[in-house]
Each structure stands twice: as structure tokens, then as C-alpha cells.
Amino acid sequence: MTKESQKHKTSASMIEPAPAALYAGSDMALNVQVSCPSNCNLQGSKVTITSDDGAAIKEIELVSFGRPANETDEFIVRAPTKPGEYTWTAVFAAQEQEGVLHEECSTSFSFVVKPHTTSIAVWDVPSPIVFNTSFTIKVGVQCSAECELAAKEVAIHDDTGVRVATGTLGDAPWSDTGALYWAEIDLKAPSVEGYYTWEAKFSKPDMELGHEGSCYPFGFRTATQPDHVVTVEVLDKVTKTPIKRSDVILHPYRGYTDERGVAMLTVPKGDYELYIMAAEKQSFQTTLNVAGDVAVRAELLVVPVEDTSG
């Protein structure tokens, strides 16, 4: 039996403060040190991280000694999946070493678990749209931690707040994005000519990790039936290859080129300013008189790189 005189008090502390806030289910890096005023080497002894209810989260060993502190290596624990405020404790249990009983000590640390945020993008919205006709848009949702959102639902609400359509996010993210899961959604334009602001909504999903919902407003104009078709072909001036997803505007009509570099806009007869814009290309502009069906070919040059060497 260890004598009373052979008891040593100990103290525990975090080498670096725990993060004040982190996302649900994310990794948290911690370091713990335990000191004995008698400069005892406690290497090999264990420290246990416990949750609010006392459940053991992780056990880690003291691996280094530098008078008077014994330290763990940096180790990782996973934050809770449910958002809220938490207080965990690093516990050094009483343990005997070389005839000396080192008393229990502990240190607590608090943190806030935040739900993952989400953001919505809406694109390929035609405008204007012939009133009372169908049209299609694309809607994408991304998590701040790039969680998989495949098969989750996104809804479209009209200007009165009524849900008019839903879509299911696909299995694969949009190309060239890390985790923008997207869907094509078919809609029907209002039967009255005018400008409308609708909203894409992603409700808080039922997932193991807490997530917030999000919403994004988008606008479009409805108009009467156009008279003529304007076909615009957009090519790279040097390579003569099609430029897809160019932005083609005959105000207030707007469209985007397809895989062939072609956009087709139906418009009433009249005079228009044609604008064409594409990523990393010089823009194109010309005046266009539409008295019948019209075909336009635009060749764009790459934007020159500015020389900053001098």
C-alpha cells in the first residue's frame, strides 16, 4: 500500500486551446500535458478524453517529458455530429509509478459545433420566356465541407411563395466543381407578361451531420410569342473550334451556346444590340436588325495576358 507521503499532486492542461467552433463531424486536433511538481517522468501513462456525459472518446499516451511537463503527441478526435455547445474533459486518472501514486487531475475545454452551411446556384435561366410555356433551369447545391448531397431534394417557389416544382440532385457533381450537386428542373412560365422573381430552396436535410438549408432568388421576364429565330454561332477565331456556354444577349432576350457553339433565340422583329461574352475571350458586339430569321457568326479572340514583368 502506498504511503500518504508518497502521493504526488498533478495538473493537466491543453498545450494549445481547443477550437472555439467547428463544423459537425469535423476533426479536432488536440495536445494535452500533465505536470508533476516533483518533476516526475510520466511517459507511458494515459490521458482519456471524455464527453459531457463522461463517455470515453479517446485514450492517448504521454510520450515526451520535459521538466515538469509530460506531453502527448498531437492527436485527432471527431467533433459531435449534432450542432450545439459541448464541454469535454481530458482526464489523467490516478496511477502509481515507481512506488509513487500520482493523483488524478483533469482539464476541461468547451467548443461549439456548427451545422454545415449550404449554398445554392441557379443557372441557364432563359429570359424572356414566352408566357404560359415550359422552360428548364439548372440548380446546384454545395455543402461548405463538400459533403455528398446526391439524391437530396431542391424546390422552386414562385413569387407568391407557392412551391411549383421539385428536383432531385444527381449522383455526380457539376464538372470542374468539388461538390456542387445539381439537377435540371422543368418549370412553366406564368400566363401574364411581366418580370418575376422566384426562389430555389434547399431545406435542412435529414443527414447524420447537421446541415443548414439555403435559398437563392432568381429572376426572369415573360413576353409574347416572338416572330423570328436568331441563330448565333460562336467560334474561337484562331482554332475555329466552337465555344460552348458563351453568353448571348439580344436585350432583353438571352441564351447560351451549346456543345456546337450555337445559341438560338426567338425574338420579335426590331433592332437589337447583340452582345456575346465567353470566359477568357474578348467580347463581341454588333447592331442587328431582325426582320426575319437571322444567322450570325462571331469569332472571339483569347484575352491577351497582361505583361507585369516590367
Image: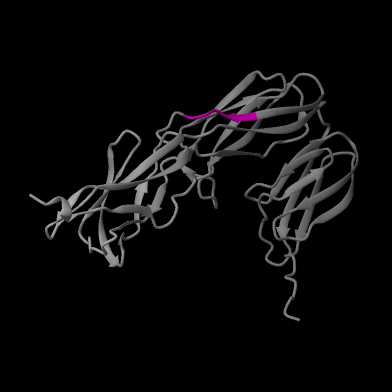
**Lateral position of residue 5 relative to residue 241, left or right:** left
Judging depth in this view, the residue of 53 and 138 nearest the camera is: 53
Q: How is the image coloured?
A: one colour
Judging depth in this view, the residue of 230 and 102 nearest the camera is: 102
Judging depth in this view, the residue of 31 and 166 nearest the camera is: 31
* Coordinates of residue 166 in the picture (x, y in percent): 56, 25
* Coordinates of residue 288 in the picture (x, y in percent): 89, 47
What is the magenta range? 200-205
* Residue 213 is inside the magenta segment: no
Res 172 visible: no
At horizontal 28% and vertical 53% (from top left) the residue drawn is: 10
**Quadrant of image for the C terminus:** bottom right
* Coordinates of residue 167 in the picture (x, y in percent): 54, 29
Res 16 visible: yes
* Residue 202 is inside the magenta segment: yes
At horizontal 76% and vertical 45% (from top left) the residue drawn is: 231
